[in-house]
Amino acid sequence: MRRQLRPTDVKRLNRAWRRQTGNRLSLILESVTGPFNVGSIFRTAAAFGADQIWLAGNATPPTNPKAGKTALGTERLVTWHEAMPAGDAVKAARDDGYTVLAIELTAGAAPLHRADLDRDVCLVVGSEDHGCSPALLDAVDGACYIPQVGRVGSVNVAVAAAIALAEARRQEWQNLAEVPESP
């Protein structure tokens, strides 16, 4: 019979996955202004073990009460940097050893599942309305997109960030010799 894991079992399972994880993940949020999106992105980033989030353009900070309500305190688990110009955020991430990849449908972008995410990577998501700016796209190391087969042209920015973070960890974990099992 299946049962939900007790909090102690969840902590043990998460600790086992953390021991199997060596790559660093980070994000740049360019002009992501919706506080509920920002809070959701911070919560997902914390769940996938992202180290840092750089805010760029006019991105809403996680100190916004609505962002905090969605983040549920997880904003304290991820180092974040006050909003700065997009190019400065890309430079800061690159200087910290990350390969910077925009999640954006552009010419030459690779499908997300074919992008090389099994390394220290900083993923960039842009505003809901306009995506990543041309200046940011000129500054990044590459771009990848989320393949979609439905009749909708895009997903919510928080969903896009979650898909990209999950794919980065999936690529890292796909060849593990020992996969942690739930108790």
Image: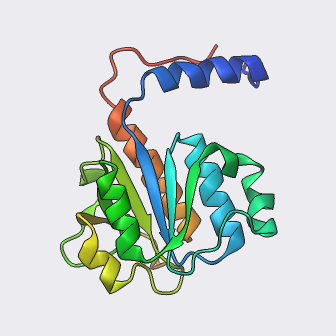
Q: Quadrant of the N terminus?
A: top right
Residue positioned 56% across, 71% down in the render: 156
Nearest the camera: 84 or 23?
A: 84
x, y percent for residue 155: 52, 71
Q: Is residue 89 above or below residue 173?
A: below
Quarter occupied by the C terminus = top right
The relative height of residue 22 versus residue 100 in the rendered view (above or below) is above
Camera-nearest residue between 115 and 43 = 43
Location of residue 135 (image quadrant): bottom left
Residue 34 vertical position relative to residue 168 in the rendered view, above or below: below
Q: Is residue 102 left or right of residue 55?
A: left
Choose between 153 and 74: the one closer to the eye: 74
Q: Residue at x 53, y 18 (%)?
A: 16
Question: Residue 67 appears in which quarter of the rendering?
Answer: bottom right
Residue 158 screen position, x and y as percent? 58, 64
Q: How many labels were placed on the picture?
A: 0
Q: Is residue 145 visible?
A: no
Q: How is the image coloured?
A: rainbow
Measured from the top left, where is residue 69 in percent x and y?
81, 60
- Which residue: 31% across, 59% down? 100
Residue 16 shows up from this direction: yes
User: Is 162 in front, or is 155?
Assistant: 162
Q: Residue at x 46, y 50 (%)?
A: 165
Task: Give the quadrant of residue 86.
Answer: bottom left
* Residue 88, percent from left and from top: 38, 71
